[in-house]
Image (cartoon, grey):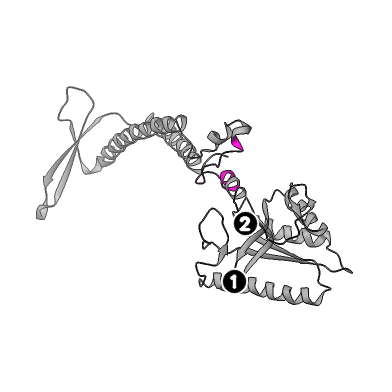
Amino acid sequence: MTEKILQELIVRRKRTGLACSRLKEKLKHAPAGRLRVVTKKGRGGAPKYQYYVSYSEGDTNGRYLPKSEERTAAAIAQRDYERALLEHKQKELSFLDKAISGYVSESVQPVYDALLPGRRRLVTPENAGTAEQAVAFWKKKRYKANPFPEKPNLMTKAGVPVRSKSEALIADALHQAGLPFHYEYPIRLLNDTLYYADFFILNPATGREFVWEHFGCMDKPDYCAHTIKKINDYICYIEAARAGHLKADCAPYDADKSEVQKSAPFSFLMTFEDKETPLQSQQIEAQLLQILG
């Protein structure tokens, strides 16, 4: 994608080129003659101008132009101004041509792209560059895994093991939509409450982050009670973030840091199921629309 600054240079170059063409065409029909302006003191000390025009090199004084012929003086003065303006625009045009032809993009993506694949996978791209680099950096975030004894054992298309068939469906849908995610990502909320979010998701186009929790055992009373508490904890955190009341210990965990860091709030998404009402594709699609919208 052409960078905005380069687009602006190209637009400016086109505009300046059109101005030069217009001035050249106008000067073809400009009047001849050389204008001389004499300044004298008028009434009350105000300047008074007299105009003289000459049409030959040897005529240094020129013919005086009375008030009735001031339009002739104005036409010659306009011509001289437009000549100077054309010279200025031509210098601008030359500068713009050099700037466009020698333009060096601020993006450092080509440096990363030039690496061989074997090297590229080892490198963390410069985080101040393009959106693609920012996504690559986000994907490489390190974090502590969920200490739950039972390990995930269902492999998804993204190569991420998950714990349930429904989570596998969600993971595959995210992968197909081109949405990078971290599975069971630690989120520390208010009062040091720590949850391992089922999916911590990034929209690469907008940079927005999402937490997607799937509640899969809503037919169990104890599970429902825990679900209500978890939803309430997330809502309280998001409301505190919106009000600007977040403390330093309220943020997604980042293992690259020595402690939990404050970060911008994420959006919170939920899906539900029980034995009688399993997760439907429409539920997944509705949440994807929220992320991509």
Residue 33, above or below 277: above
- 229 vs 53, nearest the viewer: 229
> In the rendered image, which quarter contains the C terminus?
bottom right
Can you see residue 269?
A: yes
Q: Amino acid at mark 1?
A: Tyr
Residue 107, above or below 266: above
Which residue is found at the position 77% from the left and 47% from the top? 157
Q: Which residue is mark 1?
A: 237
Prevailing secondary structure class for the magenta stretch in the rendered image: loop
Q: Is residue 106 left or right of residue 73?
A: right
Q: Amino acid at mark 2?
A: Lys
Task: Report helix, strand or loop for mark 2.
Answer: loop
Q: Which residue is mark 2?
A: 144
Label 1 or label 2, whichever lies nearer to me, is: 2
Residue 229 badge:
none
Residue 232: image location, x then y, percent: 66, 75
Q: Quadrant of residue 272?
A: bottom right
> In the rendered image, which quarter contains the N terminus?
top right
How many residues crowd mark 1 within 10 Å: few (<14), some (14–19), many (20+)? Answer: many
On whether residue 113 falls in the magenta region, the answer is: no
**Magenta region: which residues?**
120-135
